[in-house]
Amino acid sequence: MSECDQISGMFLELHEGNVDSETRSRCYDHMNECRCCREEFQWYSTAVKALAGLERVSPPRDFMVQLDRRLDAVSSRSWLDFLKYLTVTAPRMPLPAGVAALLCIVLIGYSLYRQPPAEIAHQAGTLISTPVATAKEAAKPTSPATGRATIAAVSGDGALATASYPSLSNPSTNLPRLPLTTPESGFSGAKSAQNLMPTVADRLGADNLTVVSARPEEAQELLKRILPGLHGTVVREDLQPNAREGLVRIIIPPDAYGSLTRALVDHGDIESGAGAGVDPPKPVQEQGNGILLYVRFVRPQ
Amino acid sequence: MCPVLAFPETILGGLCLILVNLLVLASTYRPEEDEDSEVVKDCVQGNRDAFNILVEKYYRRIYNLAYRFVGDQEEANDLAQDIFTAAYQNLKRFRGESKFSTWLFQIATNRGKNRFKYLKRRGYFANKGPIDGDEDREGLPRELPDTSSNPEDLLAGKEIQRIVQEAIDDLEPDHKEIVILRDIEGFSYEEIARMLDLPEGTTKSRLHRARMVVKEKLKKVLS
């Protein structure tokens, strides 16, 4: 490399004065003798000055207004942009964390959905202070907004029902539900519900019928009498003489539900029937088109 | 004193000395102070007015930088707005490790370089006529400088401005950004190196080559 090339390579440092005095003297000595290098350095300095001396260009007067509009457009993100932000841009919530959080929410929600409300309340330590209603009380209309006649329902041999007919659950029924009861507690007067465990019958919904009658034997006989007319049959009956309560399992066609309850109303055993407007419980698959009903006969205290 | 005990004492003394030195260093250390830090904090919390304060402060410089990249006022306007929009959108990513101005100019340089490459690919600079503001002088003969005089005397005048801008337009993007940041915007080598994520030596060598190119252009036109 010639000395001229070396000097040329040092123009930047020379121009900015970042060389030691010895090097500077050597460079200037060379440039005093070499006209070419001297001129080149002069042009170099000129170029730097020309660059530094470029006039500043002014932005248009409405620059800020235009920018404001643009920022407004950016601020109003679309739904798609938001998703993009979540998955790509969001620095504090990477995609795996977001997906994990979403899965947690779904799992918790699903487990709560599967859990009966009673268990949730019980687990939460909630005290249900409402006295357990008797079947007679519960037979009163509970939905004044709709004016629909309702029947006291629920409470029965839950364990048996679960074992025999797991598909008996009928959440779509419009019949009301009693406060949580067990067969033992449901008819023995008011009792704090905090000690009561929900039965399977509670989960089954209104596929059970409680008949509160001063003459349960007569009511049971009435049931047996009207069943053939409704194309229903008795599956099993557990009713002992002079017992305070008994249970009869019957199978009836779904459309006979209203007629059955009306007959019981006429007999004075329940206050009101389901009526034609009430959707009957869904048929139990194991029993063909018939629905299995647990009819509990209770003598009032 | 027993020589066996003297040795641990020496080590202990050395450790104490190191500890004192560290304490002195820690007490004298001052992180790079950023005059915009308070306003930036407000911006990150979603305060648009605070962002407007920053825009008001920097938009002239950013616009000028954008103009030097693209050499056209309309393009520069769009580019400058694009730069501020990007800054606004990415403000939450700014961690305060550098000054806000350094961060903003880093965005500006990246965007400017990309826009320049894009325009160059589309032949924008090849087809470009006289730069803005010179349209009204198209009919007039070019005011060529008197080459007999000293080159430094020639620097005054619009024509030189145009020639220098054309020289910048012809630079490679990697050289162009350094010339703009150093010679036009006046950033230090340290700041440029941080913005472009380059060693200082590379920054200087690129700047030198870029200046030599500009020098040759000027010499060719003015001589």
Image (spheres, helix red, strand yellow):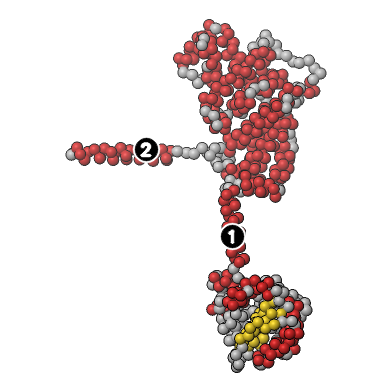
Res A177 → quadrant: bottom right
Nearest-to-viewer mark from 1 and 2:
1
Mark carried by residue B21: 2
Residue position marked by numbered label 1 in the rendering? A107
Image spot of residue B167 (x, y percent): 67, 20
B37 versus A247 height, above or below: above
Extreme residue toward the top, this view: A33
Residue B45 located left or right of residue B190: right
User: Which of the pair A22/A219 is nearer the observer?
Assistant: A219
Q: Is residue B210 visible?
A: yes
Residue A6 located left or right of residue A63: left
Residue appearing at x 57%, y 23% in the figure: B206
User: Which of the pair A222/B62 is nearer the observer?
Assistant: A222
Q: Is residue A131 visible?
A: no
User: Which of the pair A7/A281 is nearer the observer?
Assistant: A281
Image spot of residue B123 (x, y percent): 73, 25
Residue appearing at x 43%, y 38% in the figure: B28
